[in-house]
Image: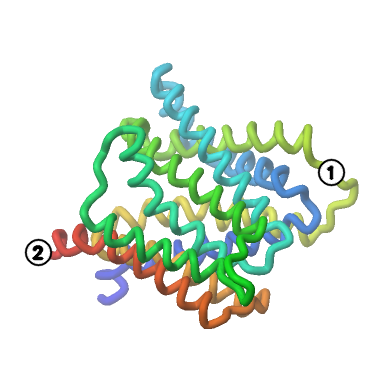
Amino acid sequence: MFLQHYRGELILLLTTILASAGWFFSKYAIADFPPVGFIAIRFFLAAIIFLPFAYKHLAKLGFTQLKMAGIVGIFFSLNLITWIIAITGNAKLGQGAFIMSLSLLIAPFISWLIFRNKPSHSFWFALPVAISGLYFLVLDGKGISLSMNDGAFLVSSFMAAFYFVLINQYAKQIPALPLTTILFLIVAFVGGCYSLFIEDWQVNIQMDALWWLIASVLIATNLRFLLQTIGQKHCNIVNASFIMLLEPVWTLLLSLWILSESLSIGKGVGCLLILGSLIIYRLPFLLKKWK
């Protein structure tokens, strides 16, 4: 009875774990693959898996819908490319995941600047808390120190925010499966072009890297998308909003365990402040749904 009643919540919880595991699948795969080339292959294979199921819907899309999906896909590609560059050679994936989560607060600010959609009052309370959290994350014994990797994570969070805003503005009328397939194909194309001209490919790719690639495609991409769709369908939106905040938490815990990431008290405070800012931002919406 418990499993039946809370199946949506449990599925979404599993989804956040798979999303955080995807960070580590990618981290190990790029030991042999060029980073952006890996992203191109991963999302091309994921698109091929979805294509037979999305083909009929894709054929019905008009030019305007395809154009809007293309615009969204460009920012989705930039988000993933800067993200994979950030995790290359970086053992602080947990810290990076919390920096990436700032995209949820950057998005309403971008929406306000571009489309004049005023942020909610809770945004202005959450923003200084988030900035304080970022300050603690980049603070070290000598003062503020924003590393290249942290900077790449921050750029990726801005690209993710643009992606969130544009997909909300332009892609509401496109069914989820064909839209996702188009986005995956665009990532494969943009990433493939970048990798072809910028990156070096080694001849020998170890079998371990191929297994991590397969896990990234089947588990962290296709299975994750499927479970997230099912979970959101069967889960109360209030519970879903809280559960989806757990991805950076799982990523941090896994990074502490697998990569032995160091977490000082200051950086721990930074993570808590960022998580708190996201809860503050969503709290009025959640309270309204609970009434």
Task: Read off the residue under disc 1.
Answer: 201
Q: For this rendering, which residue is in front, 227 or 195?
A: 195
Label 1 sits on a secondary structure element that is: loop
Outermost residue, right side: 203
Picture quarter containing residue 58? top left
Outermost residue, top side: 63
Does residue 26 appear anywhere in the picture? no
Q: Which colour scheme is used?
A: rainbow
Q: For this rendering, which residue is in front, 157 or 124?
A: 124
Q: Which amino acid does label 2 sit on?
A: Lys
Q: Position of residue 52 (x, y in %)?
A: 52, 34
Q: Which residue is drawn at 60% across and 54% down?
A: 151
Q: Residue at x 31, y 31 (%)?
A: 173
Q: In this view, does 200 lie to the left or right of 149?
A: right
Outermost residue, left side: 291
Q: Position of residue 250 (x, y in %)?
A: 50, 71
Image quadrant holding the N terminus, namely bottom left
Q: Position of residue 166 (x, y in %)?
A: 39, 36
Q: Which residue is drawn at 53% across and 62% down?
A: 97
- Neighbour class for label 1 at 10 Å: few (<14), some, many (≥20)? few
Outermost residue, bottom side: 265
Mark on residue 291?
A: 2
Mark on residue 24?
A: none
Answer above or below: position of 187 versus 119. Answer: above
